[in-house]
Image (cartoon, rainbow, N blue to C red):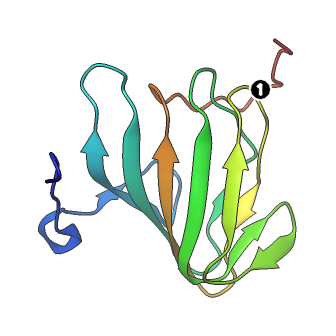
């Protein structure tokens, strides 16, 4: 039996400080800080290139067009990146929704990553 059960429709969207981007936190671990979120990007929204100091990240495109570093990907595309690895910018031409898992506490760093 699953220990966590969430219906996406029961979770509210939360706007981010980035225009046109909002998230639904589906689950967050209290001990590790790991979390699973849905991210919706409106048409034309841009998330700047960034990195996370602790969290590895996986992204799965649920719908729409997800543009990663200038290349457009469609539904069913999967991405994986290690902590301290710069990724993005992310954008969407027509809008998209992605499912993202972070393996640890999440931070959002936009300055240059320091090699570990």
Image quadrant where residue 56 sits: top right
The image position of residue 104, as x and y in percent, is 47, 27
Q: Position of residue 77 (x, y in %)?
A: 68, 73
Is 52 left, or right, of 12 in this rendering?
right
Q: Is residue 53 left or right of residue 81?
A: left
Location of residue 28 with respect to 78 vertically, above or below: above
Task: Identify the image quadrant of residue 52.
Answer: top right
- The residue at the point 75 percent across, 71 percent down is 67
The secondary element bearing badge 1 is classed as: loop
Residue at the spot 71% in from the left edge and 32% down from the top edge: 110
* Image position of 5 (left or right of 96): left
21, above or below 67, in the image: above
Q: Nearer the viewer, residue 59 or 66?
A: 59
Q: Quadrant of the N terminus?
A: bottom left
Q: Considering depth in this image, is 69 or 103 the residue closer to the camera?
A: 103
Image height of 25 relative to 82, above or below = below
> Which residue is denoted by mark 1 in the rendering?
111
The x and y percentages for residue 7 are 16, 68
> Residue shown at 77%/26% (left/top)?
111
Q: Percent from the top left, x then y, of residue 105?
A: 44, 25
């Amino acid at each position: 039996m699953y220990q966590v059960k969430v219906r996406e429709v029961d979770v509210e969207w939360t706007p981010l400080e980035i225009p046109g981007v909002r998230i639904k936190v589906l689950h967050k671990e209290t001990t590790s800080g790991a979390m699973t979120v849905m991210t919706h990007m409106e048409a034309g929204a841009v998330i700047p290139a960034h990195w996370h100091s602790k969290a590895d990240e996986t992204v799965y495109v649920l719908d729409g067009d997800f543009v990663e570093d200038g290349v457009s990907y469609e539904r069913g595309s999967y991405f994986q990146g290690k902590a301290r690895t710069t990724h993005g910018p992310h954008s969407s031409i027509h809008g998209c929704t992605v499912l993202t898992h972070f393996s640890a506490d999440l931070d959002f760093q936009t300055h240059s990553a320091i090699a570990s």
